[in-house]
């Protein structure tokens, strides 16, 4: 069973994303902000995907992405941003930092699951 | 002495006015009479005072004209000035009310966000629980299918017992048939033995007759026939023994001829019963097979229907989760209300200062999630103007894969 991490400061988002992915057969772990997410990502070696919010306290999603992609051990880990933001400059920044996808909230569960399956297929 | 009091005194002292007659009181005239010098001095003072008064009159006239000009100016600019004051006053009043209202709104916004978050979490747990129960039920149904399906222990047991019963019935039938054949063979043999016994009986009868004739002849022969008589006698005994054995055989064959048909009849009856049992067994096994097949089909249909319903539940739960995902963006939008209100409220002091430099400069700071001052796009930041060839913002629910 492939493991996915959900990083979001909203309990409802963690629940909804976790439930959607769990029903699709994924094992889900959670982090409550960018710092928590970065630490757990570094500690876990069996993650197949990260779904991450952008606006979070302590460390936002794009900064967390830049940190884990910046030559770390998890540089190849696919990351999808899940956020209310949709501005092109933010999307480009995330893409440049190594994100594999961008989903705008409120999200469609079937699209999220399809993206997760595609990005973890390899 | 003032001009007025001097003038009054002069009039009372008899100074001739244009219309007033000289005072008739000579004592007062004598007392208040002024000398020519003093009169000239008074006139000089009056003239000086008049000059001063004329100067003041000019100043007053100038002030009057200035005031008139200012009045004219105010008349022209009067409404604006009046409005500025009123605006400043109203703005302060409005700001006070707005501040109170926004503080209350901020509290209600956070309360609404908390309530909606709790409600959404509870609904999400219910949805997850429903899906889990549906999956468990499907697993149970599939377990039943495995228990009664092809190759299952239940199916194999039925097949094995059915085969065993059929084999047993076939074996019994076969043995009964063999017994029937044996009985028929025994009956035929017995009949042949009976025939042979009849023949032996005839032979024995002829032997007795022959023995009697031999004894008669032996008697005719006298002593020469004694040996012959002995032989005849022995042959007579032998014939008797043969007849006796033949009678015994006859009794046995008679018994066999009586019992074997009855046995054969019973074997036929058993075979008939066996045949009926076999038919009923085959019919029962066929019905059992049909029931098993029907059960397997029913369970299979139930599993298939259950899987379809679970798929529907999963799909509906995904739609429910998608619908519930409104809460987080809603909360973020609600959080912006106090922030935007703060922007509005905090611009009012700046506006007021243009009217009243001493206007209150208190800044309203609503409570919002602290993103460490590192929010990528804060309300204070200007909206980035898109380039003419720039991309449009991603819409809600949109998925982009890079």
Image (cartoon, coloured by chain):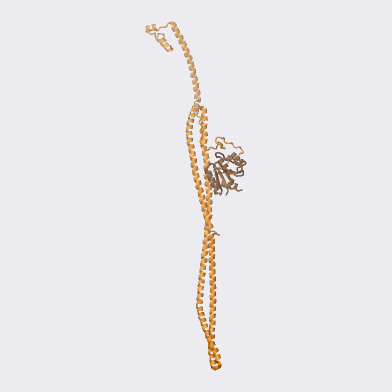
Chain colours: A brown, B orange
* B105 vs B265: above or below: above
B83 w.r.t. A90: above or below: above
- Residue depicted at 53% across the width and 49% down the height: B314
Q: Is residue B168 visible?
A: yes
- Image quarter where the C terminus of chain B lies is top right
Q: Quadrant of residue B39?
A: top left
Nearest to the observer: residue B288 or residue B322: B288
Q: Where residue A52 appears, x then y in whole percent?
A: 57, 43
Relative depth, front residue between B145 and B71: B145
Determine if residue B326 is in view. no
- Number of labels in the image equals 0
Specify the farthest residue to the right: A71
Please state the horizontal and vertical placement of residue B229, each as a whole percent of the image: 54, 90
- Residue B134 pos. (x, y %): 51, 51
Q: Position of residue B166 (x, y in %)?
A: 54, 66
Question: Which residue is found at the position 50% from the left and 22% from the top?
Answer: B70
In-image side of B400 versus B126 (left or right): right
Q: Would you identify the image quadrant in which residue B149 lies?
A: bottom right
Quadrant location, the N terminus of chain B: top left
Question: Is B108 in front, or is A21?
Answer: A21
Question: Residue at 50% of width from left, 44% of height from top?
Answer: B121
* Whether residue B93 is situated above or below residue B65 in the rendered picture: below
């Amino acid at each position: 069973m492939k493991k996915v991490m959900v990083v979001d400061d909203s309990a409802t988002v963690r629940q909804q994303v976790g439930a959607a992915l769990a029903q699709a057969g994924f094992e889900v772990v959670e982090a409550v902000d960018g710092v928590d997410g970065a630490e757990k990502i570094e500690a876990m070696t069996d993650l197949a995907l990260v779904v991450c919010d952008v606006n979070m306290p302590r460390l936002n999603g794009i900064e967390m992405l830049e940190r884990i992609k910046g030559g770390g051990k998890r540089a190849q880990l696919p990351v999808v941003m899940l956020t209310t933001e949709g501005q092109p400059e933010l999307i480009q920044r995330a893409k440049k930092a190594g994100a594999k996808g961008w989903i705008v909230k409120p999200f469609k569960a079937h699209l999220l699951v399809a993206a997760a399956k595609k990005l973890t297929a390899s | 002495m003032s001009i007025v009091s001097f003038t009054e005194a002069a009039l009372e002292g008899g100074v001739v006015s244009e219309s007033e007659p000289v005072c008739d009181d000579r004592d007062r005239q004598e007392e208040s009479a002024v000398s020519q010098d003093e009169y000239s001095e008074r006139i000089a003072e009056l003239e000086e005072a008049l000059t001063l008064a004329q100067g003041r009159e000019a100043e007053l006239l100038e002030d009057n004209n200035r005031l008139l000009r200012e009045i004219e100016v105010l008349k022209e600019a009067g409404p604006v000035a009046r409005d500025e004051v009123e605006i400043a006053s109203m703005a302060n009043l409005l700001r006070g009310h707005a501040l109170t209202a926004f503080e209350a709104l901020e509290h209600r916004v956070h309360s609404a966000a908390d309530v909606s978050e709790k409600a959404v979490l509870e609904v999400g747990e219910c949805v997850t629980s429903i899906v889990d129960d549906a999956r468990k039920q499907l697993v149970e149904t599939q377990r039943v299918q495995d228990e009664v399906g092809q190759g299952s222990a239940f199916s194999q047991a039925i097949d094995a017992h059915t085969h065993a019963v059929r084999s047993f019935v076939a074996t019994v039938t076969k043995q009964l048939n063999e017994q029937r054949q044996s009985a028929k063979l025994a009956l035929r043999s017995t009949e042949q033995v009976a025939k042979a016994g009849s023949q032996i009986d005839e032979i024995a009868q002829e032997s007795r007759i022959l023995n009697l004739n031999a004894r008669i002849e032996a008697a005719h022969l006298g002593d020469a026939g004694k040996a012959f008589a002995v032989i005849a006698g022995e042959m007579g005994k032998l014939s008797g023994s043969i007849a006796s054995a033949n009678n015994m055989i006859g009794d046995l064959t008679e018994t066999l001829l009586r019992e074997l048909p009855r046995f054969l009849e019973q074997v036929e009856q058993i075979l008939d019963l066996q045949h009926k049992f076999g038919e009923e067994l085959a019919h029962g096994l066929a019905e059992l097979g049909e029931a098993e097949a029907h059960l397997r089909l029913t369970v299979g249909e139930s599993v298939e229907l259950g899987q379809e319903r679970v798929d529907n539940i999963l799909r509906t739960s995904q739609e429910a989760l998608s619908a519930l995902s409104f809460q987080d963006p809603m909360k973020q939008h609600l959080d912006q209300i106090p922030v935007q209100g703060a922007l509005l409220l905090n611009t009012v002091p700046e506006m007021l200062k243009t009217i009243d430099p001493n206007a209150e400069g208190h800044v309203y700071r609503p409570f919002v999630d602290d993103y460490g001052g590192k929010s990528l796009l804060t309300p204070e930041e200007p909206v980035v103007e898109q380039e003419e060839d720039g991309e449009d913002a991603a819409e809600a629910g949109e998925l982009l894969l890079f």
